[in-house]
RNA sequence: AGCGGCGUAGCUCAGUCGGUAAGAGCGCUCGACUCAUAAUCGAGAGGUCGCCAGUUCGAUUCUGGCCGCCGCUACCA
């Protein structure tokens, strides 16, 4: 039995949930469900990042306290994930006491180990923004937001000695060939390390909405170092060392490519500085693009998951997102493509298959299901579909996994076309053909469960099985021949109604 | 500019650690079927695997160059 601790980034509460957030969260949910199907111990973590200047600002604008602002937006993320059937095991908020404890513990260890020191931070400061800007961000020497001249300011900050970790980080890359996948992002992360690392300022005195530095209460930790630590917090760091020892070695971070630097360079260095082992593993994905524009930063095209789920269904959305957007490269995201995928794979494919099988069963033998043929030609298809599906999930390629699973759907349709059960008289041959089709549906319901849990449970129910495919245990559950004769099969409304294109 | 990535059928994408591997789905054309959600099944058309050169018995797969697109370049999560 394995152990898997999957994480999403924690989402910043100055923004409401959109498909960019949902993409990472759905992939994590499906991966977690796939592992649970194997009886593995799984801990799936998501949450919200609630400190920092932007939250303080948003709160002021809305006439709220920062905590109220955080409460309000954090709730919207939980609602979005509940709507999408995200089975998270923990939802962490960085304003929780357990997180304060973990951040203070982790960074105090870094401090005690000599990797944190006080120095003066100097930079271009915009008084209106109350924020520093890098020279490159300035527009003709002016603040990019207000257009006013910036001032050279300086303040005392604590710095993290990132520069001390270059060699150890490179050793980590050397020792762990799959520390970051896909490989393209591993290369990018390694290039960042090789390119040279400068120390980082990790505290602020100009800001109140943050976690206080334990050895110097005038400072709060800068929000990134607060945020990254959430993964350790949730595993029990600083509050439950036994629990931490159990889960930390199993940690796998899912993240978008835009935050590689923070996750794949800064975070491992912080862990090294604090003496935490081992290093996490990282699974990095690209962006969903809408007409070539990154969804997360193009406010006009921000799409709320709810709006899509309303028109194509929760499982329609889950399936399409996972199937059509390979985990790794950037991919195009469009409503038309979602609808197309729902109609072809779900309505015409799985849904229609279920409908034709249950219809024929309902017309014969009083709706009672029959047993499959141990020597069915579909047995080999089911076996290879499972193997290929499992291999793809293991490589963190949900789109490929679903493609492989759907081979069984397709070949079952071919099989029915070939045997023409609607022409057969009641008897052994008809029983065998229907038994085979029901068995194929049973196996598909298990293999597809990570992507479309709700629909698979309904398939399970309609073919007369007890419980839920979530309770099935792979790889045994994929073995051909387990559908029991004598169950009552239910004919219902189409499982996935076709979606109109407009 | 430096560093990094991407470029495979109309579309969305797999794949090749160099050799019968040029693939899938969708879309399209023709045909079959009618149990089923105008669904299903079969056949077919469609690509010099961005361009050029090199290494090799052989490259889409390796190396170099070029073209096109994109990301990062540090305190904006």
Image (cartoon, coloured by chain):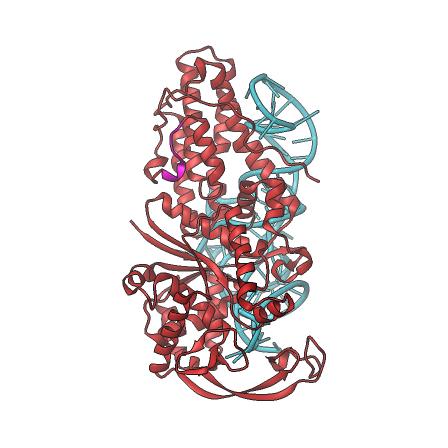
When the figure is inspected, residue A423 is found, relative to residue A497, above or below; the finding is above
Q: Is residue A81 visible?
A: yes
The structure residue drawn at horizontal position 55% and vertical position 68%, both measured from the top left corner, is A66
Which is more toward the observer, B13 or A487? A487
Residue occupying the far left of the picture: A242
Location of residue A187 with respect to A1 vertically, above or below: below
Q: Which residues are magenta?
A: A465-471
- Residue A329 shown left or right of residue A165 in the figure: right
Rendered colour, chain B: cyan
User: At 36% from the left edge and 51% from the top edge, which residue is drawn?
Assistant: A42
Task: Report the residue at 48% width, 38% height from top.
Answer: A454
Residue A478 pos. (x, y %): 37, 36
Q: Is residue A197 visible?
A: no
> Magenta stretch: residue A375 in it?
no
Which chain is represented by red in the image? Answer: A
Decide whether residue A468 is among the magenta residues: yes
A6 vs A217, nearest the viewer: A217
In the image, residue A361 sits, relative to residue A389, either above or below, namely above
């Amino acid at each position: 039995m394995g152990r898997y601790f999957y994480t999403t980034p924690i989402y910043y509460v100055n923004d409401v949930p959109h498909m960019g957030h949902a993409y990472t969260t759905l992939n994590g949910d499906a991966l977690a469900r796939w592992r649970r199907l194997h009886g593995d111990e799984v801990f799936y973590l998501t949450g919200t990042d609630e400190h920092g200047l932007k939250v303080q600002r948003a709160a002021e604008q809305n006439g709220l306290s920062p905590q109220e602002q955080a409460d309000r937006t954090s709730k919207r993320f939980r609602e979005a994930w509940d709507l999408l059937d995200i089975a998270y095991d923990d939802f962490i908020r960085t304003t929780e006491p357990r997180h304060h404890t973990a951040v203070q513990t982790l960074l105090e260890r870094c401090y005690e180990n000599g990797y944190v020191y006080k120095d003066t931070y100097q930079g271009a400061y915009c008084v209106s923004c109350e924020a520093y800007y890098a020279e490159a961000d300035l527009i003709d020497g002016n603040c990019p937001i207000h257009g006013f001249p910036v001032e050279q300011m300086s303040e005392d900050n604590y710095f993290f000695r990132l520069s001390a970790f270059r060699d150890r980080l490179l050793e980590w890359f050397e020792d762990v060939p799959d520390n970051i996948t896909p490989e393209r992002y591993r290369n990018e992360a390694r290039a960042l390390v090789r390119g040279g690392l400068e120390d980082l300022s990790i505290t602020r005195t100009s800001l109140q909405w943050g976690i206080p530095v334990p050895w110097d209460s005038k400072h709060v930790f800068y929000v990134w170092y607060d945020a990254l630590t959430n993964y350790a917090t949730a595993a029990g760091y600083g509050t439950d060392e036994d629990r931490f020892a159990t889960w930390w070695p199993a940690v796998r971070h899912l993240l978008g490519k835009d935050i590689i630097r923070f996750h794949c360079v800064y975070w491992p260095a912080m862990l090294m500085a604090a003496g935490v082992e081992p290093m996490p593993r990282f699974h990095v994905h690209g962006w969903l693009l809408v007409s070539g524009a990154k969804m997360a930063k193009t406010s006009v095209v921000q799409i709320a998951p709810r709006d899509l789920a309303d028109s194509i269904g929760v499982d329609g959305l889950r399936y399409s997102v996972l199937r059509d957007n390979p985990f790794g490269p950037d991919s195009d995201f469009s409503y038309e493509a979602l609808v197309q995928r729902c109609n072809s794979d779900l309505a015409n494919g799985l849904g229609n298959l279920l409908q034709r099988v249950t219809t024929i069963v309902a017309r014969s033998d009083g709706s009672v299901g029959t047993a499959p043929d141990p020597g069915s030609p579909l047995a080999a298809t089911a076996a290879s579909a499972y193997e290929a599906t499992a291999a793809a999930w293991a490589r963190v390629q949900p789109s490929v996994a679903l493609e492989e699973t759907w081979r069984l759907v397709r070949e079952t349709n071919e099989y029915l076309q070939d045997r023409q059960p609607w022409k057969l008289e009641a008897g052994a041959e008809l029983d065998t053909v229907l038994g085979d089709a029901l068995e194929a549906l049973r196996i598909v319901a298990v293999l597809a469960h990570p992507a479309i849990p709700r629909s698979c449970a309904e398939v399970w129910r309609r073919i007369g099985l007890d419980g839920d495919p979530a309770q099935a245990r792979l790889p045994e559950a994929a073995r051909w021949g387990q559908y029991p004769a004598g169950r009552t099969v239910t004919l219902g409304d189409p499982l996935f109604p076709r979606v109109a294109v407009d």
